[in-house]
C-alpha cells in the first residue's frame, strides 16, 4: 500500500511525516479474515494495534450468560490502541461481521511510533474524545422511542462508514441482534422496525449482497426529529 493511500484511509495519520508513514508501512503486517472469525479474544488484547482497511467488525462483551455487541467499526477505524496504552484487563472480543482486511503493528512498534511522531499523541487524544462522545450519544438514545433509537443508530453507521450509491448511502446489512444491542432495544422490535421503515421507503435491504441502503440521510434525520 502506498503512503498516500494509507493516510487517506486512516485520518489518524493525516499529519504524519512521509518518513513515519514509510517506516510504518515497512513494519505493519497485512491480514485477511473471513466472516465470523474471532479476531481477538479477551486474553489477547495489548499485543498489537489493528487498522481496518476493508470490511466490518464488532466489539462484543462475551460471558457464559450473554453476548452483547458494544460497537461496530469499519474502514478507516483502528482498535487495540487503548489496550496497548492501558494494560488493564479487557472483557471484550472482536469478531468479523464480513470478510475483513486488516493491517497491524506490534505494541512495541506502536509506542515507538508515538515517540517518533509527537503529533500522533494529539491525534490519539482526538480519537479517544470522539469515542467518548459516541458513547455519550448512545447513552442518550434511551430517552427516545425504539424506532428513533434504531433509525439514529443506522444514521450514525451510515455517516461514519457509508458508501454513496444510486440507492442511497450503503452500509453492511448488520444482523438484527447486533443492531438491537447498539440501539438498546430487543431483537424482535428491531426486525419489526426494519420491516416497517423498509416498506416506507426509508431504507432498501439487499440480503443477497448483505447490504442496507439509507435512501436519503437528510430526509431521515428530518423524519427522526418529527417522530
Image (spheres, grey):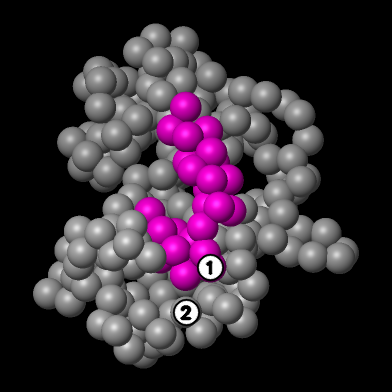
Task: For mark 2, give the secondary structure.
Answer: helix
Q: Foreground residue, 199 or 43? A: 199
Q: Is residue 100 left or right of residue 43?
A: left
Region rendered in magenta = 129-157
Q: Quadrant of the C terminus?
A: bottom left
Q: Would you name the residue on which mark 2 appears?
A: 193
Q: Would you name the residue on which mark 1 appears?
A: 146
Count of marks placed on residues: 2
Q: Foreground residue, 182 or 100? A: 182
Q: Residue at x 29, y 65 (%)?
A: 223
Does residue 35 sit above or below 149 in this rendering? below
Task: For mark 1, give the secondary structure.
Answer: helix
To which quarter of the image does residue 100 belong?
bottom left
- How far across and down, in percent of the image, does residue 161 sit? 32, 55
Q: Residue at x 46, y 10 (%)?
A: 115
Q: Residue at x 47, y 79 (%)?
A: 193
Q: Foreground residue, 199 or 48? A: 199
Residue 133 falls inside the magenta stretch:
yes
Q: Quadrant of the N terminus?
A: top left
Q: Is residue 8 left or right of residue 94?
A: left
Mark 1 and 2 residues: CB-CB less than 8 Å, in contact?
yes
Q: CA distance from mark 1 to mark 2?
A: 8 Å
Q: Residue at x 51, y 84 (%)?
A: 192
| Mark 2: few/some/many CA within 10 Å (<14, 14-19, 20+) | some
The residue positioned farthest toward the front in the image shown: 226
Query: Which label sits on residue 195?
Result: none
- How far across and down, in percent of the image, does residue 129 sit? 47, 27
Q: Foreground residue, 93 or 167? A: 167
Task: Tell me which numbered mark, 1 or 2, is placed earlier along the sequence.
Answer: 1
- Can residue 158 be seen? no
Amino acid at each position: 500500500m502506498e503512503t498516500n493511500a494509507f493516510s487517506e484511509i486512516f485520518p489518524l495519520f493525516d499529519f504524519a511525516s512521509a518518513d513515519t508513514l514509510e517506516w510504518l508501512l515497512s513494519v505493519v503486517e497485512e491480514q485477511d479474515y473471513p466472516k465470523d472469525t474471532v479476531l481477538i479474544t479477551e486474553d489477547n488484547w495489548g499485543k498489537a494495534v489493528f487498522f481496518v482497511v476493508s470490511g466490518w467488525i464488532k466489539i462484543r462483551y462475551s460471558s457464559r450468560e450473554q453476548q452483547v455487541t458494544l460497537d461496530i467499526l469499519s474502514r478507516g477505524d483502528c482498535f487495540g490502541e487503548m489496550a496497548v496504552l492501558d494494560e488493564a484487563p479487557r472483557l471484550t472480543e472482536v469478531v468479523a461481521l464480513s470478510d475483513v482486511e486488516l493491517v497491524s503493528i506490534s505494541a512495541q512498534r506502536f509506542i515507538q511510533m508515538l515517540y517518533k511522531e509527537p503529533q500522533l499523541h494529539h491525534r490519539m487524544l482526538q480519537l479517544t474524545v470522539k469515542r467518548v462522545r459516541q458513547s455519550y450519544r448512545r447513552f442518550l438514545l434511551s430517552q427516545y422511542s425504539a424506532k428513533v433509537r434504531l433509525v439514529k443508530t443506522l444514521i450514525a453507521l451510515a455517516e461514519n462508514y457509508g458508501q454513496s450509491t444510486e440507492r442511497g448511502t450503503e452500509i453492511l446489512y448488520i444482523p438484527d441482534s447486533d443492531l438491537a444491542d447498539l440501539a438498546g432495544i430487543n431483537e424482535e422490535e428491531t426486525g419489526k422496525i426494519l420491516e416497517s421503515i423498509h416498506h416506507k421507503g426509508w431504507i432498501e435491504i439487499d440480503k443477497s449482497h448483505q447490504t442496507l441502503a439509507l435512501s436519503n440521510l437528510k430526509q431521515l434525520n428530518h423524519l427522526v426529529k418529527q417522530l
